[in-house]
Image (tube, coloured by chain):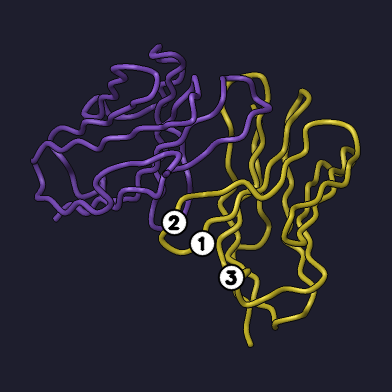
Amino acid sequence: DTAVSQTPKYLVTQMGNDKSIKCEQNLGHDTMYWYKQDSKKFLKIMFSYNNKELIINETVPNRFSPKSPDKAHLNLHINSLELGDSAVYFCASSQDRRPNTEAFFGQGTRLTVV
Amino acid sequence: AQSVTQLDSQVPVFEEAPVELRCNYSSSVSVYLFWYVQYPNQGLQLLLKYLSGSTLVESINGFEAEFNKSQTSFHLRKPSVHISDTAEYFCAVSTGGFKTIFGAGTRLFVKA
């Protein structure tokens, strides 16, 4: 069974569209994250939720809105997509919010905005 | 605020040669240090971590890293690499701020 699964794996869409990426973890973890990896492989945290509560909200355009219906799911909705949103988006989870816990990553969603 | 610097963006090396991937960090408080590996078209996986205790930590596939507090470094080493070690390697640091900071990554390319 996949520990952290995200769908879709690939997403090609036009500028101005709205899209969602879904993420689920079956590890029983309390904390989940969204990361953005750009074309140079730089990985930047966007959001983090702990038990459905938003705990990290980096400087991200408000077109990006995370939603955590329960602690096993963290979805990312993006409005009015722009060319610069093209990247690989990774969902991750960790046992809890303590800094000494490792993160488990999904396979990534490659978003291409045309 | 903490930061992580991976000094080499790419490291080409021949199979069976030793390799060192360098990582330096800055932080005013105690840190936890991680190395993650990303194989092509996959997510990141934990390779090894330093939390406390022995400054030398090892992974199951022959990598090791040494925490050096005075030099604020956490370099990753392997005495003999394989083709299958070709991947992107990320150093990461975490403190008490609920946020892990990743380095820019080092691409290890192992040549036959």
Residue furthest toward the bottom? B112
The percent position of residue B54, horizontal first and vertical second, equals 91, 39
> Do the CB atoms of the residues marked 1 and 2 lie less than 8 Å apart?
yes
Q: Secondary structure at mark 2?
A: loop
Q: Chain of mark 3?
A: B
Q: Quadrant of the rendered structure where residue A49 is? A: top left
Task: Depth check: give the residue in front, A84 or A31.
Answer: A31
- Mark 2 and mark 3 lie on one chain; the one further toward the N terminus is 2
- Tags 3 and 1 both on a single chain: yes
Residue ID at (10%, 47%)? A15
Q: Chain of mark 1?
A: B
| Residue at the image position 65 percent from the left and 71 percent from the top | B11
Please name whichever residue, A4 or B86, is drawn nearer the observer in this view of the structure. A4
Chain represented in purple: A
For the colour yellow, the matching chain is B
Residue found farthest to the front: A1
Distance CA(mark 3)–CA(mark 1): 7 Å
Residue type at the position of mark 3: Thr
| 3D distance between C-alphas at marks 1 and 2 | 6 Å
The residue carrying mark 2 is: B42
Reading the image, the residue beneath label 1 is: B39
Label total for image: 3
Q: Residue at x 56, y 51 (%)?
A: B104
